Image (cartoon, rainbow, N blue to C red):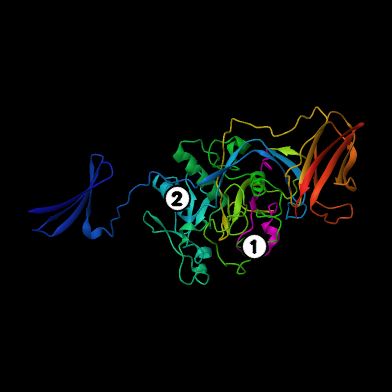
Amino acid sequence: MRRRIMALLGLGLIVGVAVSQSDEVWKMRVHRGGGTDEYLVTEVDSVTFSAIVDTFAAPPMDTVPAGVFVMGDGEAACGNQEHEVTLTRDFYLGQYEVTNHEYLEALQWAFEHGYVTVDTNSVKDNLDGAHEVLLYLGMHPSYLEDAEIQFDGVGSFHLQEALSAHDVYPDGYDPADHPVKNLTWYGAARYCDWLSLQAGLPRAYEHSGDWSCNEGDPYGAEGYRLPTDAEWEYATQYEGERAWPWGNQGPDCSRANYGYQYCVGWTSPVGSYPDAPEYLGISDMAGNAEEFCNDWYVCSLGTTAVADPTGPSSGHSRVVHGGGWRASGGLLLRCASRWPESPDTGTNHYAIRLTRTADPQTIKHPVIDDSRFILESNTPNPFTARTQIRYSLPSTSPAVVNVYDATGRMIRTLRDESHGAGVHSVTWDGKNVGGEDVPAGIYLYELRWDGNRTTKRMLLVR
């Protein structure tokens, strides 16, 4: 007599356990694809049944309209040079940093589909012959106390509280809503490609050589990707040029999680700082976790106006923005601050924010006609600290840009020099000729060129 236990798993997979009472020998037979594999039960250490993850959710994103802004602020770390940047395409940007839960779901999907491999220390790429480390696990000697994503050694990833966070959260915490950490730049780019593969979109990144995005044109990519250096800074300053994502007031613990143990001492759940910035429904762009960008890093960006900048074509480090919970001061939290990091480095304070071009085929041109004498309305207006004045000249000749108060008293000359034909811009920081802040109120700005003169109004608020 024989007893049989049967289980139907997935498509065409049957596991049968049979025993003969006469010889007490237990065997397990696995039937799949017309074949049968048989194992002695005494030789089986364990049996794990898991469902293949077919889908996973993309993080919520908001639309950032195309536009023009001044990149750099004169003070930030490697952001002290100022120049005009035009972004010609709308793009979607993650409302917050990708969470541990979101990354784990995508990682499990990638593992089930053979897109990654796992060893005791790390997760590695397995597409296009690439083997770069994507994520460091808790078994790695350098990440024993920091890892929040772990692998069970069989086939499943799971979340765990980081030992490093126990003093910060003595009653425990849920790592699911904290930003994913210990991933490398490669792991950030690969996450974007997993989303694209699942959505049936072309992958944005090559997985060999310099891992270029859409052959060097990230703005034209259809798939998910990392934000460019310019897109990241533009989003923090959308609807008003400011020093920090929340405004021009210096940082404190109500505005950002920073300062190592000064504020929190570990990451906070995403969305904890919704006013950084206050526009677009985007949060946490200063502090909490530093965010990888698409560009190769160079400190000097120059002062020449550019459209859709992509950064250097190659390099050794990628751009990182946003400061983080370990940032020691407010300088690194400024919108324009940027610094380098090797693409194979993963730490407990580097994270990812998802981006995707809204319509790669639609290019907008938020620029003015460069063939006429035009003075454009300043942006932003009203403004609190800085505003940009753009104008167009039809031919080469000296031009002057002045600022006056409402009574017509001269406040400052912003530009007095020969200009070439085309579009130009200048920024006023709300100071007079002596470098002193002027009071709030209505001010006039004037463009003079070749006997022509035109004036517009602007409002400074304090």
Q: Is 12 or 33 nearer to us in this picture?
A: 12
Q: Tag count in the figure? A: 2
Q: Going 79% across and 53% down the picture, which residue do you hit?
A: 440
Where is 118 relative to 217, above or below?
below
Q: Which residues are magenta?
A: 308-337
Position in image of residue 16 (x %, y %): 19, 50
Within 10 Å of the Cα at label 2, are there few (<14), some (14-19), or many (20+) other Cα atoms? Answer: many
Where is 288 relative to 223, above or below?
below
Q: Amino acid at mark 1?
A: Ala
Q: Is residue 405 found left or right of 57 in the rendered image?
A: right
Q: Amino acid at mark 2?
A: Leu
The answer for how far apart the CA atoms under marks 1 and 2 are is 28 Å
Q: Is residue 69 found left or right of 431 in the rendered image?
A: left
Q: Quadrant of residue 391?
A: top right
Look at the numbered disc 1 and give the secondary structure of its residue: loop
Identify the residue position indicated by label 1 in the image.
327
Q: Going 60% across and 67% down the picture, which residue do you hit?
A: 263
Position in image of residue 142 (x %, y %): 53, 64
Identify the residue position indicated by label 2 in the image.
107
Q: Is 412 or 292 nearer to us in this picture?
A: 412
Question: Which residue is outermost to the right?
Answer: 451
Question: Which residue is outermost to the top?
Answer: 371
Q: Is residue 155 found left or right of 223 in the rendered image?
A: left
Q: Is 99 or 428 nearer to us in this picture?
A: 428
Please report whichever mark, 1 or 2, sits nearer to the chain's N-terminal start: 2
Q: Quadrant of residue 462?
A: bottom right
Magenta stretch contains residue 377:
no
| Residue 402 visible from this viewpoint | yes
| Residue 302 visible from this viewpoint | no
Magenta stretch contains residue 318:
yes
